[in-house]
Image (cartoon, rainbow, N blue to C red):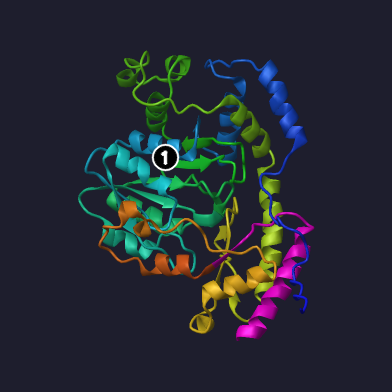
Amino acid sequence: MKNKKKPIVTIKKPHYVWPEIDKRINKKVFNYINNYKNGKNGLPDVIEKFEKKFSEFHKVNFSLCQSSCTAALHTAYNAIGLKKGDEVIISNYTFPATALPLLIIGAKPVLCDVDPKTANIDPELIENKITKKTKAICVTHWWGLPCDMERIVKIKNKYNLFLIEDCAHSPGARYKKKLVGTFGDIGCFSFDNNKLLASGEGGMLITNSKKLFEKSIIFSDFGSRLSTQIKNKNLRKFIDTGLGIKYRINFMAAKMAYEKFKSLRKLNSDRQKTFDYFCSKLNKTKSILSPLVSKDSIRGGFYGFKATIKKEYQRKINIQKFIRLLQKEGVDVRQTVTPPLHMTKLFKNNKSKFKVSEWFHKNHLSFPVFYKKNHKKIIDQYFKAIKKVESKIL
């Protein structure tokens, strides 16, 4: 019996582990559990410190810690006054959490297809979706790449709509030197354990509007924070009860997210270096097109490395077969699990066609998001494996 040929990638899996165990941060969290103090708003003081630093970093007036980005989105939708029957235009290619809070409110998510180069919501298509019932646009900076915010802001202003930014994938990303989350009325961030600021779970809402900030507090919290921070007379009469749901962040998650947030620039920089290196390798392959690099944008968060097949090879290459062959060579590659919303059971009755997002979902390669210097050795072996598979099928 002949011995099977060894795969090209000899480095043992897993090739990507996140979040990393940081003993220094873990020690700080443990010490804080036993020694924390409440701040002036009656919450553990780290929450106040974190919100203050998050606001300063984004140059906004207000930040509000939340239990998740989903909670932040629900809070944001409530703050802008959405009610039953209102419409909000969102990307068809986003995580369901962008849409689900709308259904809870009774508002209608209006799905919009994406740009074929970025997989972000396509500004060209947004205006055609606007009706008399449209109250807002919610954009998702998908996989850490900012949307085309210049064009989207123009549409928002033209039709006097609210603009919400789902920044779950993209903390620290910039469009034309401006941070995502600061273009619209409210920005929402995630500290989910798979995200860059992995903290088990948590989120943040940011805004420049005092009115939206106070409406967000009274919807998502209870207790002394309401009495100290709610100044609006129409809202103060509800400070004993609040007007919604307790979406307060766990103080241990807040401490962990705060400590990691201090290193946000370095975390993004490390990913940018390996991202650029991986792209330089893929650019030397015959068939693979690396993720878009835009002169207007700087990625952040790096929640996903998604490559596609070059146009001239799309008919020649069966993507599933290509992935299987790469996996046999030891490459950690797959297709993204999260489908476009129109392909899910919840939205299957949507009559619109979403050819671009459906194509992108079915015809891309999802690689790990490498972030260490020694990950370049893995990338080198991936490159060799890709070249080997290409020699077999092209």
Where does the image place residue 287, in percent across and percent down from the top left?
59, 79
Q: Which residue is mark 1?
A: 73
Side of 282 where 351 appears, left or right: left
Where does the image place residue 242, in percent across and percent down from the top left?
36, 20
State which region is magenta. 365-394
Q: Residues within 10 Å of mark 1 (few under 14, many from 20)?
A: many
Assess whether residue 314 is covered by the magenta stretch.
no
In the image, 259 versus 378, the foreground residue is 378
**What residue appears at the point 40 percent right and 66 percent down from the top-left corner?**
358
Assess whether residue 383 is covered by the magenta stretch.
yes
In the image, 196 versus 318, the foreground residue is 318
**What residue appears at the point 49 percent right and 36 percent down from the top-left corner?**
68
Where does the image place residue 26, in percent across and percent down from the top left?
72, 31
**What residue appears at the point 78 percent right and 57 percent down from the top-left corner?**
373
Q: Is residue 163 above or below residue 384?
A: above
- Amino acid type for the residue under numbered disc 1: Leu
Where does the image place residue 130, in percent across and percent down from the top left?
26, 55
In the image, 353 versus 267, the foreground residue is 353
